[in-house]
C-alpha cells in the first residue's frame, strides 16, 4: 500500500535526522493505516511507539488520543 510505504519512509527519515515530532506523527499515521487494513498487531505496535513519542514531547492530549485508539484495538 502506498500510504504504508510513505509513512515507513517518513519514520526512517525522521529518525535519521533526529526529528522526534515528525517521526511520532508518522508512527501514529502508520497505526491508523494498519488499523484500517485490519492488522491489529502492527497497528498496536506503531501506536504504542507514537504514544511514547508524544509523552516524550509533552503532548499529553495526543498521547491520550493514541491510548484510546490502542484501547479500541484491544476490545
Image: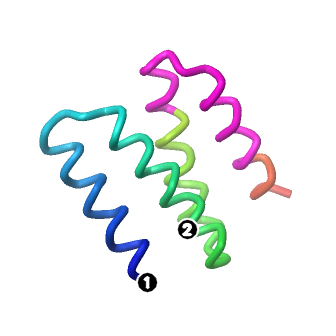
The numbered dot on residue 1 is 1
Q: Secondary structure at mark 1?
A: loop
The residue nearer to you, when weighing 72 against 26, is 26
The image shows residue 38 at horizontal and vertical percentages of 67, 77
- Whether 32 is among the magenta residues is no
Which residue is pictured at 49% across the width and 53% down the height?
46
The image shows residue 59 at horizontal and vertical percentages of 54, 21
- Whether 68 is among the magenta residues is yes
Q: Earlier in the sequence, mark 1 or mark 2?
A: 1
Which residue is pictured at 47% across the width and 43% down the height?
49
Which residue is pictured at 51% across the width and 23% down the height?
55
Q: Quadrant of the C terminus?
A: bottom right
Q: Is residue 9 left or right of residue 31?
A: left
The image shows residue 58 at horizontal and vertical percentages of 50, 16
- Figure check: 13 above or below 8: above
Crowd band around label 2 with a 10 angstrom C-alpha radius: few (<14), some (14–19), many (20+)? some
Instruction: Give the prevailing secondary structure in the magenta stretch.
Output: helix
The numbered dot on residue 12 is none
- Figure check: 41 above or below 74: below
The image shows residue 73 at horizontal and vertical percentages of 75, 58
Region rendered in magenta: 52-70
Task: Provide the residue designation for mark 2.
Answer: 33
Question: Do the numbered discs 1 and 2 sit on residues whose CB atoms are within 8 Å?
Answer: yes
Amino acid at each position: 500500500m502506498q500510504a504504508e510505504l510513505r509513512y515507513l519512509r517518513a519514520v526512517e527519515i525522521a529518525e535519521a535526522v533526529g526529528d522526534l515530532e515528525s517521526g511520532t506523527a508518522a508512527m501514529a499515521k502508520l497505526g491508523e493505516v494498519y488499523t484500517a487494513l485490519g492488522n491489529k498487531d502492527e497497528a498496536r505496535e506503531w501506536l504504542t511507539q507514537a504514544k511514547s513519542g508524544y509523552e516524550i514531547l509533552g503532548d499529553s492530549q495526543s498521547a491520550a488520543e493514541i491510548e484510546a485508539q490502542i484501547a479500541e484495538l484491544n476490545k
